[in-house]
Amino acid sequence: MTDRVLMVDDDLCTGCRICELWCSLEHGGVINTTKSRIRVRRDHRTLSNQAVVCLQCSDRFCIDACPPKTLALSLDEGTGAVLVDWEKCTGCKKCVEACPYDGIHLLAEEKKVILCDLCAGDPECVKRCPEGVLSCAARGED
């Protein structure tokens, strides 16, 4: 498999947040948007919505920021997604601070970070989005 990226067309987003619900259910077994790896933000001034998720950027600022003693973040060889090893993650938030796209979140209760892992290459949010806002493609595809 090649490196994959989640692509977002915010112009189509209605703010239904179904992507958040399915993500939290898929990864945490609960319907709880705070446990979702994708977040929908509503701009009430412009009446627009923006889906915020790890962009799987090629710079990997988050991996570089993870403390060398921890090494909680790694790259999935199959999908190219950044993965979090919960056994190693200390919740220091250095990766959260390093991400210029706000794609990493701290789960306060667990004191662990979460980010999109692309659901092993077949993202649940993409399959469930009723508006076609989300897609998953090989890196470099339009």
Image: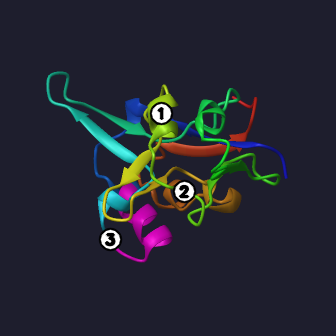
Find the residue positioned furthest to the bottom: 29
Earlier-in-chain disc, 3 versus 2:
3
Quadrant in the picture for the C terminus: top right
Numbered tag placed on residue 9 in the rendering: 1
Residue pointed to by mark 2: 89
Q: CA distance from mark 1 to mark 3?
A: 24 Å
Numbered tag placed on residue 31 in the rendering: 3
Instruction: Mark 2: give few (<14), some (14-19) or many (20+) Cα within 10 Å.
Output: some
Q: Image height check: is 75 above or below 85?
A: above
Say which of marks 1 and 2 sits in front.
2
Find the residue positioned furthest to the top: 46
The kind of residue on which mark 2 rests is Cys
Q: CA distance from mark 1 to mark 2?
A: 31 Å
Residue at 68% from the left image edge and 26% from the top image edge: 59
Q: Position of residue 64 (x, y in %)?
A: 66, 33
Earlier-in-chain disc, 1 versus 2:
1
Please count the marks in the image: 3
- Badge 3 marks a residue whose secondary structure is loop
Q: CA distance from mark 3 to mark 2?
A: 23 Å
- Badge 1 marks a residue whose secondary structure is loop
Say which of marks 1 and 3 sits in front.
3
Residue at 82% from the left image edge and 52% from the top image edge: 77
Displayed quadrant of residue 108:
bottom left
Q: Which residues are magenta?
A: 20-31
Instruction: Mark 3: give few (<14), some (14-19) or many (20+) Cα within 10 Å.
Output: some
Q: In screen coordinates, is 28 left or right of 117?
A: left
Earlier-in-chain disc, 1 versus 3:
1
Residue at 45% from the left image edge and 46% from the top image edge: 92
Specify the principal SS of the magenta part: helix
The kind of residue on which mark 3 rests is Ile
* Residue closest to the eye, 42 or 127: 42
